[in-house]
Amino acid sequence: MKKFSLALAAIAGLASVANAALADGGAKFLGNITTSSQIRSDMGTYWNQLTNENGCKWGSIHSVDNSGKSVFNFNGFDSCENGYKWAKEKPGERHFKFHALIWGSQKPDFLCTAKNPGITVEKTKQYITEWFDAVAAKFPDLEYIDVVNEAIWAGNNYHSGYNKPATGAEGISTDDPSCGGTYIIDALGGDRVVNGKHQYDFVKTAFEMARERWPEAKLIYNDYNTLSWQMNEGIEMIQTLLANGAPIDFYGQQAHDCKGMSKSDFESKLTRIHNETGLPLLISEYDIGEADDQKQKNDYANQIPFMWETEWIGGITIWGYINGATWAANTGIMEKDGRKRAAMVWLEEYFANNLDKGKNTTGEVVKVDPVPQEPFKGTAWAIPGKIEAEDFDVPGKGKNEDGTSNASFRDADSENHGDSDYRKDDAPGVDLYAKATGVVVGYNNTGDWLEYTVNVAEAGDYTMTASVATESSDASFTLSIDGKSVAEVPVSGSSWDDYADVTADVTLPAGKHILRMDVTAEYFDIDYFNFAKKGEIAIRSNARFETPVLADYDVFDMNGVRLGRMSAYSMNEAVNLLKSSSAVKVQGLYVIRSVKNGAVKSVRIAR
């Protein structure tokens, strides 16, 4: 369990001081947003928390120059920097929420496939990383962050246009239809669908990136329609993300859809969301679009007390307070001339009389316990011995206390190019192919990696032999033990069907460890790794013979027809005998199988 302390706005006595915000001294914040891109002079008179309406959104800050280099302007339109500084003027009394790191709507134009035909998944990933790093460098001590905005899958699309233009809140399009979609989802790891349910891998990745940069911030997932039309989808999304280890601290309820909602309905919906997700909530964008003053005030009176007095609601941000200067008609609670609408008068009276009723236990956030990765077949691979490449560890969930991940693989390309259903449930993104020798790991991209739990019988020097196929002259991978590199292995070849051995000498410590293969140059397919004590012969059955033993090998064509039997002292000798034999008249791919242990090897014959 990780603890977060939510500092009180001020001591209770300060609530009566002139120009003190309505919630100063209370258990949580009552905030608002910038007005027409400005921080009004009376902002601190009423509110003790600020969210920039537009100035901190990705598309407002991030651009590229003519060479494609990232440029960041934190002090431009609706200045994000000024919002941050406003809160910093009174540390501990005022609070700032960054809105938002990842959003499918107000994103940089250069990410749009129609506006920038040259954009790629790799470049998108680079720009996202640069964006996170730039925000972290500018604001290293953020308190609240909307990490991902509007990513719920509903109605054959996401709430905002991550991969194609989407219809936003209340049926109003918030996307530029000329964008043509982006590669944001692919760049952040894709979105697997398992048993018909989206796994939101890209959302999880964004939260992991945020946690790495802001270990003490309150990380928020924020969305709309979660109190009405997509409540179930939202709950399922949060449950899935938490189960998969995403470090989410709050579920942000935009609450733009509460007009006319009864007190009992409002309370029961929020309670259900909290109970079924297990997360504390933030009311992140509350407003009531109502021209009738009394009706607007009635909704405030029915809904605000529950937000303030419920211990698992961590704060309230009203989305605009000057009528005519808010995102939707009639949501303001003050007129431009200073006249206060009934809802604003009610707010002042309520907080003057009920400040001490505010409850907040969200300072302590319960984390999902991490689940460690495990050997695929329940037992660590023995070294000396052979490791099947496709039998990498079963992935775990979350991160450990020391920050290490429990993931067991990474496949940068979310599309599965393989033709095998092997491990489709626990590792659907890894490209597995069915070959004559069994299942192999293929389509290995630069940056992909696989991990295996191994048990090394004896510390010392070993020879690693890997069976690989490629048409590249400069592919490569590295091997590491518990994060420490032990070998760099070049890979080259001329055929995807002809598997050849590549070797490397490695020094291994004794005991149980994590062996990792990192792809450092694409592409190649890999069948297995074999480790033998240096100077000893590695046999595919994992046995070692002191002297060669003559054995029988059957030869098959690719249709499975047995062509004959041959004898040889090793599989490699059998391969060479077949290649040189005049009995094979037709070129093509053949398979040799050991009669003794069933080991197989594919051989390409050229005539």
Image (tube, rainbow, N blue to C red):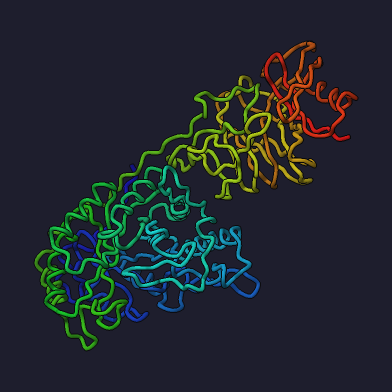
Q: Nearer the viewer, residue 246 or 95?
A: 246
- Residue positioned most to the left: 353
Residue 206, image x and y in percent? 46, 55
Residue 321, image x and y in percent? 25, 77
- The part of the image, by quadrant, that contains residue 497 is top right
Can I make out residue 142 in this image?
Answer: no
Q: Quadrant of the C terminus?
A: top right
- The part of the image, by quadrant, that contains residue 105 is bottom left
Residue depicted at x 78% and y 11%: 549
Is 210 left or right of 303, judged from the image as shown? right
> Relative to residue 155, is residue 235 depicted above or below?
above
Q: Nearer the viewer, residue 551 or 77?
A: 551
Is 315 left or right of 523, judged from the image as shown? left
What number of labels is visible?
A: 0
Residue 412, image x and y in percent? 58, 49
Is 250 left or right of 503, judged from the image as shown? left
Residue depicted at x 45% and y 34%: 372
Residue depicted at x 61% and y 69%: 117
Residue depicted at x 60% and y 65%: 119
Residue 71, image x and y in percent? 56, 71
> Relative to residue 335, is residue 188 depicted above or below?
above
- Residue positioned most to the right: 582
Q: Nearer the viewer, residue 346 or 589?
A: 589
> Relative to residue 76, is residue 318 depicted above or below?
above
Q: Quadrant of the N terminus?
A: top left
Is 129 left or right of 218, judged from the image as shown? right
Can I make out residue 321 in this image?
Answer: yes
